[in-house]
Image (cartoon, rainbow, N blue to C red):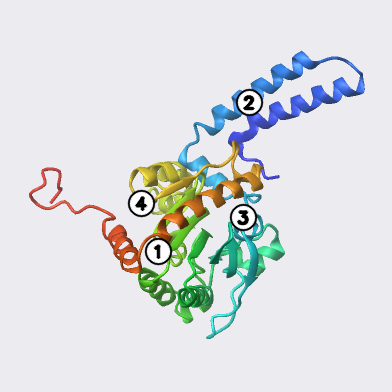
């Protein structure tokens, strides 16, 4: 498993604990007191590490290769998934799977970015960076959901939309912009969940929703910390400072009112326990689905529009803090 630098103190204690247990078993020695002390120390160390994570450390967790991806949540939190393919224009995009499913007995359409864990899968999924076909397929499925009166759940996990020449030739910017407009007008509830990385327009292309929710150790930003550091400090080594300044992690975005809820992760992050993370994910989704389902269509659209119009604040010339 990928080891993050700040996790090493806990990992070292885990190894010492395993050695004690192995010695106790192999030599038939009662070392229960020593093992108990080591377990307590390990628990304290883990709690100290994960209760005091910096934004940059959360970004590292969000990118962990063993973190559950979109199809992991589909497998663990949804049932009866029926994947649909193709955008009806160019082709299919394996980095943006989607289809019909059930969650807690509710019929929904689920769409999201899918990454890979090895070279072969990453090439197939394009490292989670969708092409124009992916966004057009996503919108096709959303329109299908609207036709049948089904809520839409989008699962965001991408460093950004694919920036290659082919994507530009097939108008990736137009595909994302069109999704932004059409998602604002969908007449069914829409819930977006940032699972890991929520990068730039690639995330926003399926992120216009009645409820925007993040996992505790995900991030959501217009640019990566490394990209910001390269622009402002002229070097990627300043990514930790950029992550702190950008307020891109769930606790900061919740305080700013830019997201609606945060899904708690197990100690150590979602990559340590996929099932408990999926269980927490399911509970939060069902709670918000129930609330949104109680709204009339007109109220749903009005609330969604107001939500996004209220993002940001304008400080006029009469405001004493205005720089103008």
Estimate the x, y position of residue 37 in percent, counting from the top left.
70, 16
Residue at numbered disc 2: 43
Question: Are the residues flagged by discs 1 and 2 in contact, CB closer than 8 Å?
Answer: no
Residue at numbered disc 3: 77
Residue at numbered disc 4: 258
Vertical relation: 30 (above or below) 197: above
Quarter placement of the N terminus: top right
What residue is drawn where x is 12% and y is 51%?
Answer: 324
Question: Are the residues flagged by discs 3 and 2 in contact, CB closer than 8 Å?
Answer: no
What residue is drawn where x is 75% and y is 25%?
Answer: 17
The mark that comes first in sequence, 1 or 3, is 3
Estimate the x, y position of residue 83 in percent, counting from the top left.
63, 72
User: Which residue reaches farthest bottom?
Assistant: 89
Residue at numbered disc 1: 208
Disc 1 to disc 2, how far (Cα)? 39 Å
Q: Helix, strand or loop at disc 3?
A: helix
Q: Which of these two is toward me, 66 or 4? A: 66
């Amino acid at each position: 498993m990928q080891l993050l630098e700040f996790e090493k103190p806990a990992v070292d204690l885990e190894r010492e604990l395993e050695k004690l247990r192995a010695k106790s078993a192999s030599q038939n020695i009662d070392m229960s007191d020593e093992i108990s002390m080591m377990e307590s120390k390990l628990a304290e160390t883990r709690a100290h590490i994960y209760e005091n994570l910096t934004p940059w450390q959360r970004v590292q967790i969000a990118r962990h290769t063993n973190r559950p991806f979109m199809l992991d949540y589909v497998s663990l939190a949804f049932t009866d998934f029926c994947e649909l393919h193709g955008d009806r224009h160019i082709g299919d995009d394996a980095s943006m799977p989607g289809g019909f499913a059930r969650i807690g007995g509710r019929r929904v359409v689920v769409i999201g970015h899918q990454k890979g864990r090895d070279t072969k899968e990453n090439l197939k999924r394009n490292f989670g960076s969708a092409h124009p076909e992916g966004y057009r397929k996503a919108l096709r499925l959303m329109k299908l959901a609207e036709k049948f009166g089904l809520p839409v759940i989008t699962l965001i996990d991408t460093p950004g939309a694919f920036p290659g020449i082919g994507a530009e030739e097939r108008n990736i910017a137009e595909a994302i912009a069109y999704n932004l407009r059409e998602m604002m007008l969908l007449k069914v509830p829409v819930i977006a969940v940032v699972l890991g990385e929520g990068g730039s327009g690639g995330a926003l292309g399926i992120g216009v929703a009645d409820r925007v929710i993040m996992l505790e150790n995900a991030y959501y930003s217009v640019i990566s910390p490394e990209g910001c550091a390269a622009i402002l400090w002229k070097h990627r080594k300043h990514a930790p400072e950029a992550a702190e300044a950008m307020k891109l992690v769930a606790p900061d975005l919740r305080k700013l009112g830019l997201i609606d809820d945060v899904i708690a992760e197990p100690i150590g992050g979602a990559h340590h326990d996929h099932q408990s993370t999926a269980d927490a994910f399911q509970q939060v989704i069902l709670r918000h689905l129930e609330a949104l389902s109680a709204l009339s269509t007109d109220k749903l659209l009005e609330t969604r529009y107001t939500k996004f119009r209220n993002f940001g604040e304008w400080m006029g010339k009469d405001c004493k803090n205005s720089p103008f």
